[in-house]
Image: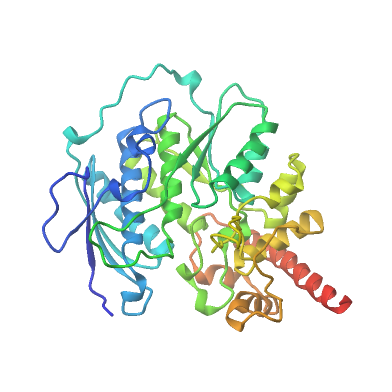
Amino acid sequence: MTDAPVHYSWLSRPDAPPPPPPWQPLTDALYWESPRRAPDRRQLLAPAPDWADDIQRVARAVFAADRCTFRKESFDRWTRHIHLSVPVTVPDIWSRALPHLTSLLTTVTGDRWNVEFRPYDATELPRSRPLPFGPEDYAREVALFSGGLDSLGWAAQRATVRSPRDLLLVTFEERNFESLQDTVYEAVLRQSERDLRRLEQSQTVRKPKGATFALERSTRSRGLLYAATAVHAAAAERVPVVHIPENGQLALNPPLSAARACACSTRSVHPWTLHHLNRVIAEIAGTPETAVRVVNPFAALTKGEVCAAARDAGLPQEVLEATLSCGTPPSRQRGGTPLAHCGLCFPCLVRRSGLLHAYGEDRTPYAAAPWDPSLRPGRTQHWRALQRWLDTPCTVLDVMADTPLPPGAHPAELLSVVERGREELRRLVSAVRGRRRAA
């Protein structure tokens, strides 16, 4: 076990000379993606500004470093010390944004980060071809589209807004579940009143050649990768806002116990995370007119309220049940059929409560039910922790104690979302107890 920093240098291109020790090289070649989906070949209608290329490069470097640094080798089997060097167009500008970037990375991963910037060689920049599109062809809106309930609900709502300009949805492939994401997207496409475009990206990182270590599975920084890619697309097509739909209940994600505090619970869309991300963008973009702002349109809604909004937007129940919500999805069911939900993790429990709220039932095929008495205790830990948490009062201090809130946040309103979500979860617990009594 060690607390020594791991040094990574992100190279401008895979064939660039490797850095001297102790630096280890990371490049775009680590991403398992087809050439047509490489960062410089995305199907956008205009080239992105330099600052957007930079933030995308930084996010890809961070995610690769995250995957290549095994938590169990750190002194406490979680907190790592990562020293990262990334080439950017104007290092001095990025140095001004560094405090916010460091706070952002610490919040989402729970690690110690030292990030330094060096000049990006202009001769290595990809040559942008002149594109035959004008502003009238650009997208009007950009949103992340994971294939989950929340992103589906937002896409369904925005697809029904008539507009002569596109809705651009940014998707990161979930390995083994690409067909599920396609099915959900096609459901939105069928009812859309406007043109949709979909930008599909890879989040699969492979081990460097010759590496003997295991890739880290916690991937806490992937939310930054998603957001930065959407920001890059929005900046290219002059869209001022990126929507990252996540119900406020899971965006805040208050820990069920003290052992799950801070980055032990996902913080990808927490208000504090978005605050620092937006401050980074504001620093590097130059002017408010060229910047892009990242917002969560569902910050005031619970999972059940998001499900109800998707239902009211005209989506059938079976489409909502076809979405992907699991934090640790089983890769394959016996017989080779993909199974998307373990049924036991906290996101699965929140999903169950949300669909129950909207439809009075949840017909999603889960691998297991946490209330099954035949399960080993280790597999029911989330269910037991949830019930203890629901029996404990939640206050404004509890909402703020785990992760800070940004300036301008309204703690009482955030607590209201959490409490409404807790009521949905209590109804799930009551429904299970009612079925047990009936049996």
Residue appearing at x 17%, y 38% in the figure = 121
Quarter occupied by residue 397: bottom right
Residue appearing at x 69%, y 71% in the figure = 369
Whether residue 323 can be seen here: yes
Of the 4 image quadrants, the one containing the N terminus is bottom left
- In front of the other: 124 or 435: 435
Quarter occupied by residue 130: top left
Image-based side of 117 in relation to 64, left or right: left
Of the 4 image quadrants, the one containing the C terminus is bottom right
Q: Up-down: is 301 above or below 45?
A: below
Residue appearing at x 38%, y 64% in the figure = 106
Q: Up-down: is 365 above or below 96?
A: below
- In front of the other: 385 or 189: 189
- In front of the other: 252 or 23: 23
- In front of the other: 273 or 129: 129
**Which residue in the rendered view is the most extreme toward the left?**
20
Residue appearing at x 42%, y 42% in the figure = 229
**Which residue in the rendered view is the most extreme toward the bottom?**
377
Q: In x, y percent, where is residue 360?
A: 82, 58
Q: In x, y percent, where is residue 219?
A: 42, 61
Q: In x, y percent, where is residue 239?
A: 48, 32
Q: In x, y percent, where is residue 11?
A: 21, 48
Whether residue 306 can be seen here: no
Q: Up-down: is 82 above or below 297?
A: below
In this figure, what is the number of numbered marks?
Answer: 0
